[in-house]
Image (cartoon, rainbow, N blue to C red):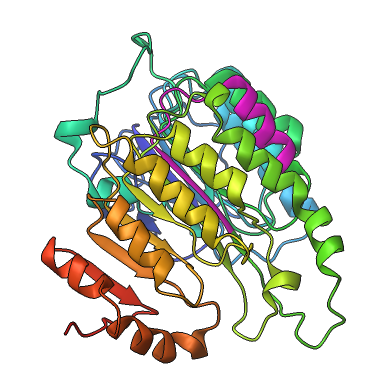
Amino acid sequence: MERITFSVIDNPPVDARYGNLTTATLPSNTTTNTVGRTINMRNSPLLIENYASLTYLQFAFQSYDGGMDDCTCMTIQLCSILRRCPHLVHLFLESGGAVRHGECIDQVLFYCPRLETLVLSPNAEMPPSILDQRMNHNDINDNYDNVAHIEKRKLKNLVMVGGDIKLTPQHLIKMYQKYHTTLELLYLQYNGEWSEPISLSELARLGTPRLREFRLKSDIQRSSYNEIEPSLQRWKKAHRPIQQALENFFSSSSDCKNLQVIQLTNKYPIRARAEADCHIHVDDPVLEAIAKNCSRLRYMDLTGVCDYSYPDGLVQFATILGTQQQQLQLGYLKLYVGDSTDVALEMVQQLSTLKEFHIVPRYPFQRHTLADRFELSSVPLLMRDRGGTLTVGGIIPHTH
C-alpha cells in the first residue's frame, strides 16, 4: 500500500499533493495493495493493517462533530498508524478538532524519517505554492549557497494553517530543531497567540539555509469596530513579539539568503479598525532586514500588515535592494504605500526588475480615489514601458 486517505465523508477528498505529484481524486478500493483507499474511521478497524510501505497519508474530517472522547480515540488510532510508517513521505492532517496534532507530530519526529511534506490545514489539503505557480524551477531548484548535500529525505514543506490546531511552542521548536536545515516552504498562521513568536524566534536562531518560500497570515474572524478601540501604544506592545520575531527571522544570522517568496498578510473585516484588529506588524527594521539579507527575493506580498508610518521605510527598502543590481530579481510587489504617489514612483525607479506592482489602499472604499491619483502620475507609464503592470486596489490606472 502506497497511499491511503481516512475520511468521515461519503466521497473521498481531493488528493492535493505538493511538488511534482499530480492532482487526482483518490479512488476507493478494499484491497490492501491499491494505490488509493478511503476508510470511514467510525466504522473501520484501523489497527490491523500493515503500513510499512505507506508513503502518502491524508486524514480529513470535514464533517467532524465528535466530542473529546472521539478526539482521543482518533488520536490514539492515528498515532498507532504513524508508528508503523517508516517510509511515509507526505502527511496531510485536518486542522480542525479531529485529532491532537502535537501527539501526532511526536510520532512523526521519531518514526517517519523520510517525511518531506507535513500539512495541517482545512480539509487536509496543500495550499498552492506561489513559487511553483510563478517560477521556473529549472533555474532555481538547486541554487543553494554553502549547503551540504542532503542524502536522506528530510522535511521540505511545512504548512500549519487553519483554526483549532492543537500544538504548543515546544512541538514547533522540536520540529524546527530537527528540520531547519532542510525546510524549503514554510506556511504559518498567526492570530495573536504567543506560541508563534516564541517558535519563530527559535527558528531564526537556528537558521533556514534552504528556505525559499515563507508565508505568514492572520485571518481575523471578527471586527472590533463596535468595541472600545485599544490605545495605539497598548496595541503595539501586544504585538511587539511577532514584530521582533520577524525582524530576527529576516536577519543575517538566520541565513535566509535563498528566500524568494515572502507573504505577510492580515485579513480582517472591511469595517475593522486596522490598529485594533491587525496582528502582523511590519515596520522599518523588518523591511530593512529583508532588503539587506534576502537578495534573491522575487515575490513580496504585505497585504494588510499594520504600520502606516512606514512609507519612508519602503523607499529605504527599495534603495537597498536597488543597489544590488547584479542579484536583483524582485518582480512582484503588493503592499500599501500611503496616499502619495511619490513613494511608489521612487520604488519603481529603484527596482528595475519589478514587473507586477499591486498597490493596496488602506481602506477598500479609497481605491477609486487612489487610482485616479495614480493616473496623473508617471508610475503607470514607467511600468508600461518596461512591460509591467500597475494596479491600485485592483484597478489598472490609465496612462497618458
Work out whether 128 lies above or below 371. above
Residue 314 appears at what percent x and percent y?
48, 55
As drawn, 22 above or below 204: below
Vertical arrangement, residue 115 with respect to residue 165, above or below: above
Which of the pair 135/331 is nearer the observer? Answer: 331
Q: How many marks?
A: 0
Q: Position of residue 341 (x, y in %)?
A: 40, 74
Residue 314 visible:
yes
Establish if 220 lies above or below 270.
above
Q: Return the residue nearer the eye: 222 or 266.
A: 266
Q: Is residue 38 magenta?
A: no
Instruction: From the top left corner, tell me how far across and down residue 78 is, in percent.
Output: 61, 38
Q: Which residues are magenta?
A: 197-217
Return the residue nearer the eye: 384 or 263: 384
How far from the left and from the top, in percent, is residue 225?
75, 85
Residue under the point 37% across and 46% down = 37
Residue 395 located left or right of residue 306: left
Residue 354 sits in quarter: bottom left
